[in-house]
Image (cartoon, rainbow, N blue to C red):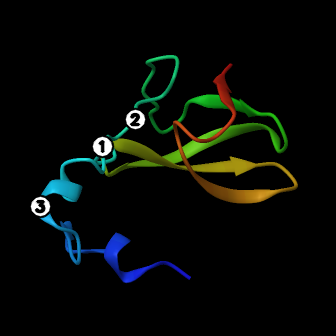
Amino acid sequence: EIDEEFLEYGGVNVGLSPGVQGIVPKPKPKKPIDGSSYRAGDKVRHKVWGDGMVVSVSDSHGDQQLSIAFPNQGVKTVIAHLAPLTKI
């Protein structure tokens, strides 16, 4: 359970006094650690799923959402900066 004072609705903190809102940091979108951006057709290696090919890329809150086709694993959708990926 999350206390009502910590919830956000539409990007606006509710239940927090103005002094407390300034203390709570706003999340910043992250970019891939290696600074690379991905494009459809890129070949990548995932630590668990192995080698795959990026089939689509879309913007997701300042980061990239990737759909990647992995042989024998199917298509997986990941957020670039969170996924353990390297370009190959």
Q: Amino acid type of disc 3?
A: Pro
49 above or below 17? above
Q: Position of residue 5 (x, y in %)?
A: 32, 76
In the rendered structure, which disc, 1 or 2, sits on the residue that comes first in sequence? 2
Q: Amino acid type of disc 2?
A: Lys
Between 37 and 24, which is closer to the camera in this rendering? 24
The number of callouts visible is 3
Callout 1 touching callout 2 (CB < 8 Å): yes
Q: Position of residue 12 (x, y in %)?
A: 17, 69
In the rendered structure, which disc, 1 or 3, sits on the residue that comes first in sequence? 3
Tag 2, which secondary structure? loop
Image position of 12 (left or right of 43): left
Q: Amino acid type of disc 1?
A: Gly
Give the residue drawn at x 88%, y 55%.
72
The image's mark for residue 18 is 3
Q: Which residue is mark 2?
A: 30
Q: Dividing the image into 4 quarters, which one contains the C terminus? A: top right
Real-space Cα separation, disc 1 to disc 3, in angstroms: 27 Å
Q: Dot 1, crowdedness within 10 Å: few (<14), some or many (≥20)? A: few
